Amino acid sequence: MNNDYTFKFILGSSLFFAAIAGYFGGKNWAIGIGIAFLLTGLKQLWDQYSKNKKDLADKENKAVISTSGEKNSRENVYQVVKKAKPLNQSMDLINFEYRTAEGMQGFYTIQVATGITGNIKGWCKERQDAREFRIDRIINDSITRVETGEVMTVKEWRKLMRENNAKNRVKAS
């Protein structure tokens, strides 16, 4: 088990200590101790949740930084400072607004490795890590190519990538 509190852990420990208090002090002690431990545990759980939500929001707010200093501006997406770790076979550098599983929204800049079919996988500049992004969570079905500033739908972008791959194969042969 990791260091995080879980509701099962809190409930179990509350019942455990209530049982001990009930054995030594009676029914009223058991109820009092059980409630006290439950409330304390729930407070810890809420504090942990709030901290995790704040940390995630801080990371989301660092999503797009333009050269003019504005954050999360769709108009300045193509001015993103390029700090990503280079991938050996990058298809494209794109930016999109994305909603995480937790419901947080933010802009992400991705050096795409794969994404013509299925989810988009690549190097996320904001997280400085390899990530996978679900297509259905991209807000407004809109992708911006950082290199050119073009805004297109996911379908249009995938079509363009397929065409580019076909051209590259012809050039290579």
Image (tube, helix red, strand yellow):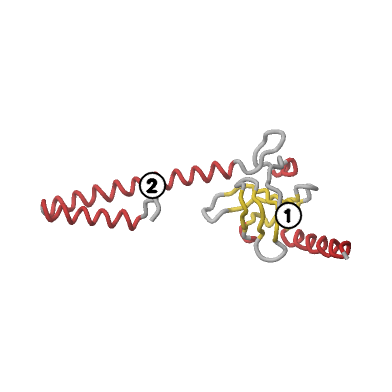
With 48 as the anchor, is 25 left or right in this view?
left
For disc 2, the marked residue is 46
Q: Quadrant of the C terminus?
A: bottom right
Q: Secondary structure at mark 1?
A: loop
Quarter of the picture containing the N terminus is bottom left
Residue 36, placed above or below residue 171: above
What residue lies at 70% left-to-right and 66% top-to-bottom?
Answer: 117
| Residue occupying the point 14% across, 50% down | 29
Residue 152: image location, x then y, percent: 75, 55
- The percent coordinates of residue 171 (x first, y second) are 88, 62
The numbered mark, 1 or 2, whose residue comes first in the sequence reads: 2
Which amino acid is tagged 2?
A: Trp
14 relative to 69 in the view: left or right? left
Q: Residues within 10 Å of mark 1 (few under 14, many from 20)?
A: few
Q: Which mark is residue 2?
A: none
Q: Quadrant of residue 62?
A: top right
> Disc 1 and disc 2: Cα gap in Å?
43 Å
Which secondary structure lies at badge 2?
helix
> Is 132 displayed left or right of 149 in the figure?
left
Please state the horizontal and vertical placement of residue 64, each as a whole percent of the image.
66, 42
The label on residue 88 is 1
Which residue extends farthest top? Answer: 68
